Image (cartoon, coloured by chain):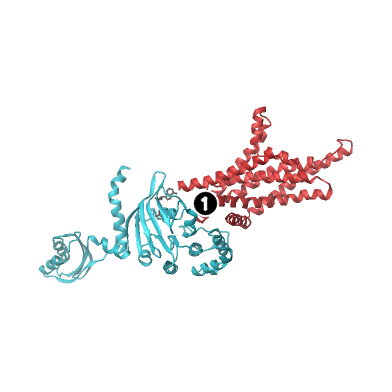
Chain colours: A cyan, B red
Amino acid sequence: MIEVQHLTKRYGPFTAVNDVSFRVERGEILGFLGPNGAGKTTTMRVLTGYMPPTEGKAVVAGYDVLEQPLEAKRRTGYLPETPPLYPDMTVRDYLLFVARIKGVPGKERRARVDQAMQRTWVADMANRHCGKLSKGYKQRVGLAQAILHNPEVLILDEPTAGLDPRQVRETRALIKELAGDHTIILSTHILPEVSQTCQRVVIINRGQVVAVDTPENLTSRVHGSATMYLQVDAPGADAAASAAAALSGVPGVTQVGVSDTQGSVTGFEIQSEQGRDVRRELAAAVVAHGWGLLELRPLRMSLEDVFVQLTTQEVQPATTEVAHE
Amino acid sequence: MNNVLAIAHKEIKAYFASPIAYIVVGFSAILFGWFFVNLLLYFDRMALQAAAGGPDTLNVNEMLIGPLLQNVAVVLLFTLPLVTMRTYSEEKRAGTIELLLTSPLTDVDIVLGKFLGAFVLYAAMLAVTAVHVGLLFLFGQPEWRPILTGYLGVLLMGSCFLSLGLFISSLTKNQIVAGMITFAVFLMFWVINWIASFAGPTMQVVLNYLSITEHLNDFTRGVIDTKHVVYYLSFIGFSLYLTVRSVDTERWRG
Ligand SMILES: Nc1ncnc2c1ncn2[C@@H]1O[C@H](COP(=O)(O)OP(=O)(O)O)[C@@H](O)[C@H]1O
Ligand SMILES: [Mg+2]
């Protein structure tokens, strides 16, 4: 439904998006995740035909955005980062105007506008001027504007930014509901948003794709250097410190940190070499010192850890580059 | 065509939702009225002299309506920058340009729609000034032909200013800056005319040709000369073309 091939966008000498490729299947919700300045908005602007790519191509709903822009635009709904509202127009007039320029036939316009206003809970503000709406309502009118002409593809740039928690929940529910008959790309820098709404995630950093996968696979895949949680009962003065020293000596362990202490019970976070299971050795070491082994389990990385790891990994090889500049 | 009308409709609604339409129409009515009264008083004095044995005939068209329409350029100098300054600048500032450029519209649809919207407001503004001229028909028998051609000329001349203002507005996201540059550029076209009267013969021809206002003279005398019509239409076409190019260039630059 959406296909991005080797997309590059430069602003003068600055490369904002660098050789990005990905696909989105029909009916899928794709999360576009990355820190600020990663190139999310730029990619979306190319997909919506707002600006042409410097290199590469993008096909939306079967039409190349550069070669057949009108066909592609007719099938795309777009919520830009700032909702594109005319402050002097009422919500209804604004949506009627948008329906008209999106090519909704005159007879259907009123019904479509009413429907979109109901779906996005803005019907009570129909006669209010757009400029007088709260941030949350503006965002929802922006969403109403995007779904108005029932497009095949929805491109939403940070759709929940600036909403209160209840509105965020409602908006996510709406997006999921829309996914059935629309194909959706939504960008965000908020992690729970991705794990809650999206089936697949593209993580982008400094203009480059660093990972494409399901949220579940990402959390287990990056699990590479394993972290264990180990809780021991070691009575006696300085037992915690000596336990830490003893555990550091176990072959394969790279780092030992104290995460919590309660009386004689101490919890450690232990990192080991990539791909090496050190649970047996750890258990043996604890028993050999005569301490009580209370708990030993692998710590799963949250998507947040994955994100930080992926995006900082990407920065490390680039540091030499930065030094050159 | 429906797209052009959609944009034009939106523009006209925006003019009347803000004070701009009222300021422009009101201000031009006042300024025009002031010229009208002064020229009328002058005409009245001439008429008295004529009765006392001055020139034989006095022509309302030549002595009143012609100069009046020529003075309209001054009214346009002040009012039309207000009409065009926000057209593109405000869309860029508010980010609504992103809606227009990602909708199934061509750049030409958008430019023509905006031009048409500005043109309708301008036509409304001229219609209000026509009330003064209408008064003359109550009290005298002016020829209607030079009045009609004169208004056609003024409409074309104003459209040149509008298309130029549209282009300037497409260059910046600050509408005040757009308005000031537009005023300065209009002033330049106005001054060219004035410089021409001091220039040498060759230079005078060139400057007069460039001067937007100079092309109006024949219209106010009741003559529609293709030369002038072509000048105005090419001026408008070229400015609108530049506007389309400017929007497109910005899109590539990002
Ligand atoms: N119009 C522009 N001109 C120059 N640089 C830009 C422009 N728009 C964005 N950038 C730069 O491109 C990079 C990516 O921006 P953007 O796509 O907005 O990122 P995101 O949406 O992920 O925060 C940023 O470093 C930003 O400063
Ligand atoms: Mg962004």
- Residue A269 is situated, as x and y percent measured from the top left of the image, at 22, 64
- Residue B23 is situated, as x and y percent measured from the top left of the image, at 66, 52
Chain ID at mark 1: B
Name the residue carrying label 1. B92
| Apparent side of residue A18 relative to residue B31 in the rendered image (left or right) | left
Residue A207 visible in image: no
Q: Identify the secondary structure beneath mark 1.
A: helix
| Apparent side of residue B76 relative to residue A21 in the rendered image (left or right) | right
Question: Quadrant of the image for the N terminus of chain B?
Answer: bottom right
| Apparent side of residue A234 relative to residue A90 in the rendered image (left or right) | left
Q: Amino acid at mark 1?
A: Lys
- Residue B241 is situated, as x and y percent measured from the top left of the image, at 56, 44
- Residue B234 is situated, as x and y percent measured from the top left of the image, at 62, 41
For disc 1, the neighbor class at 10 Å (few under 14, some 14 to 19, many from 20) is some
Residue A177 visible in image: yes
The residue that appears at 85% across and 38% down in the rendered structure is B57
Depicted A249 relative to depicted B161: above or below: below
Q: Nearer the viewer, residue B189 or A167?
A: B189
Depicted A118 relative to depicted B233: above or below: below
Residue A220 sits in quarter: bottom left
Depicted B94 relative to depicted A184: above or below: above
